[in-house]
Image (cartoon, rainbow, N blue to C red):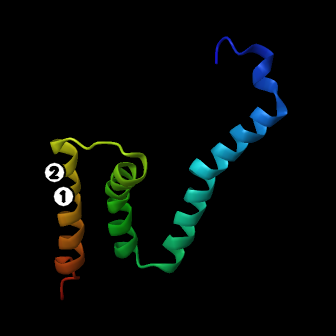
Amino acid sequence: IADGGYALLDPKLLLLGLGVALLSSAIPYSLELEALRHLPTRVFGVLMSLEPAVAALVGLLVLGELLDLRAVAAIGLVTTAAAGASLFGGRKQV
């Protein structure tokens, strides 16, 4: 990038950069806010806690990225915590 000079100002490259910016941050963020409006806060929180685990599994299946034992254990712990929050995280009766 540092040696790219004026080549970085190519309209096709700028349009590609804008597309990457929208697809990687702006659109997912707006979809998360829309989901928060329609889902209970607790359900939304559980889904957000699963997001890194799902991303790691997609990386494994789609990109062929290998997961080490620590990553597999982390995915298992996050999934267990999300399941526990869903099953046992009910509101206390007052």
Res 57 → quadrant: bottom left
Residue found farthest to the right: 11
> Vertically, is 41 above or below 1?
below
How far across and how far down the image is residue 75, in percent?
23, 55
What kind of residue is marked 1? Gly
Residue 72 at what x, y percent from top left? 20, 50
Please state which amino acid type lies under the numbered disc 2.
Ala
Instruction: Read off the residue under disc 2.
Output: 73
Please report the residue visible at 29 percent of the width from the left and 42 percent of the height from the top: 66
Q: Quadrant of residue 4?
A: top right
Q: Which residue is mark 1?
A: 76
CA–CA distance between discs 1 and 2? 5 Å
Q: Specify few, some or many for label 2: CA neighbours under 10 Å numbering under 14, 14-19, or 20 or more.
A: few
Drawn side of residue 16 relative to residue 80, left or right:
right
**Going by the image, does 82 lie left or right of 28?**
left
In what quadrant of the picture does the C terminus appear? bottom left
Q: Are marks 1 and 2 in contact (CB under 8 Å)?
A: yes
Q: Residue furthest bottom?
A: 93
Would residue 66 appear left or right of 63 to someone viewing this image?
left
Label 1: element kind: helix
Q: Is residue 15 above or below residue 47?
A: above
- CA neighbours of label 1 inside 10 A, class few (<14), some (14 to 19), many (20+): few
